[in-house]
Image (spheres, rainbow, N blue to C red):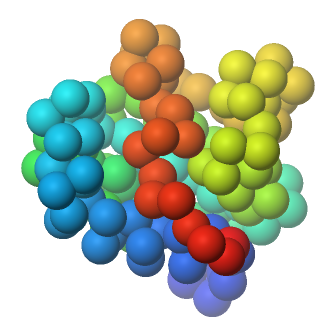
Amino acid sequence: MTEAVQLKSDALMEQMKLHVKTDAGKELTKKIGLVYQINIAPKKIGINEKSFVVDLKKGEVKEGAYTDGKPDATFSFTDDDFLKVASGKMNPQMAFMRGAMKIKGSMSAAQKFTPDIFPKASKL
């Protein structure tokens, strides 16, 4: 059932897969070296979430939950709020305080999760 969910964020995650293979992406892997799991829900956090792993240790992005132990931090967003945070339209701290983003795991790892890790999209 979850596989049928189409998210606006899917396109950004596809771009991210390519981005981590570029020189800029390799710099992120060197600089951050953490693994994030991102759960994105179409409308309400916790319902029909689609998971993505942004592995900035290995330099890869894939769909599905992290299976190699525990990610350094896990984020939960709605589709729209994820796009706002990733594009820099919503400050991650504000998103967290407003309840638009939920975080599990290391707070120091979570603080390194900024819009800078995402490719600058011309059109989202």
Image height of 114 relative to 66, above or below: above
Left or right position of 3 against 25: right
Q: Position of residue 91 (x, y in %)?
A: 73, 30
Q: Position of residue 71 (x, y in %)?
A: 32, 35
Q: Residue furthest bottom?
A: 4
Residue 113 seen in the figure: yes
What residue is at 32 percent from the left and 28 percent from the top? Answer: 72
Number of marks: 0
Residue 67 seen in the figure: no
Residue situated in front as seen by the camera: 73 or 81: 81
Among the 4 quarters of the image, the one containing residue 49: bottom right
Left or right position of 9 against 105: right
What residue is at 61 percent from the left and 72 percent from the top? Answer: 122
What residue is at 13 percent from the left and 35 percent from the top? Answer: 30
Q: Position of residue 99 (x, y in %)?
A: 83, 29
Q: Position of residue 59 (x, y in %)?
A: 17, 53
Image height of 52 relative to 18, above or below: above
Image height of 35 relative to 46, above or below: above
Residue situated in front as seen by the camera: 75 or 47: 75
What residue is at 63 percent from the left and 88 percent from the top? Answer: 4
